[in-house]
Image (tube, rainbow, N blue to C red):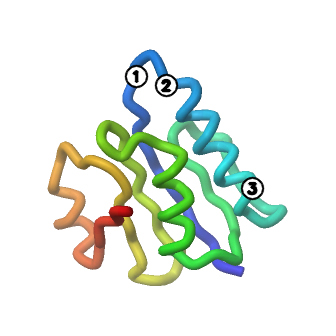
Amino acid sequence: MNTYWITFRINDDFDYSHRYESLQDTIRENAGPTWWVEPTSFIAFQSRLSTKQLAEQISYAIDPMIDVVLLTRVGFKDHVVIGTLQDADVFKLFPDLTSFSN
C-alpha cells in the first residue's frame, strides 16, 4: 500500500459542491482505511492503486479544464498534476512533476 497526498483547487462556480464531493468520494473509494482530511484542500491517504490509476480516477471527479489537483506519492519523486495550472512555478518546485491528461 502506498501513501499519497493531494492538494487541490476546485473552481468556485455553480458546480463546485458536486465536484468537491465527487473528489472526496473518489479518494474514499480508492483509499485504504487510513486517511486524513482535517486541513482544507489537502487529503493524505493510502491506496493500492498506482499514481497513474489514481490520477485517472481523480480526473473523472473534477473538471480538468478549470480545476487542479497535485497528487504526490510520499517517499518517491512521483508527482502528477491533474487539470489546469495557472502558476508554472510548481514545475520548479517539483522538477519531476508530470501532467496527466486523459
Crowd tier of the residue under label 1, counting other residues whose Cα lies within 10 Å: few below 14, some 14–19, many 20 or above: few
Q: Mark 3: which amino acid?
A: Glu
**Residue at image coords 27%, 47%:** 84
Percent position of residue 8, x then y: 44, 45
Q: How far apart are marks 1 and 2 (CA)?
A: 5 Å
Judge left or right: residue 58 versus residue 101: right
Q: From the viewer's perspective, is 48 left or right of 87?
A: right
Tag shown at residue 40: none
Quarter of the image where the N terminus is located? bottom right
First in sequence: mark 3 vs mark 2: 2
Please give the label number shown on residue 29: 3
- Distance, label 3 to label 2, CA atoms, is 20 Å
SS at mark 3?
A: helix
Q: Tags 1 and 2 in contact by the CB under 8 Å rule?
A: yes
Q: Which residue is drawn at 35% across and 60% down?
A: 81
Check the image and name the residue furthest to the front.
102
Residue 86 drawn above or below residue 70: above
Q: How many numbered badges does the structure rendering display?
A: 3
Dividing the picture into quadrants, the one containing residue 30 is: bottom right
Query: Is 40 placed left or right of 80 in the picture?
Result: right
Mark with earlier residue (3, 1): 1
Q: Name the residue under label 1.
A: 12
Give the amino acid at mark 1: Asp
- Whether pointer 3 and pointer 1 mark residues with C-beta atoms closer than 8 Å, the reply is no
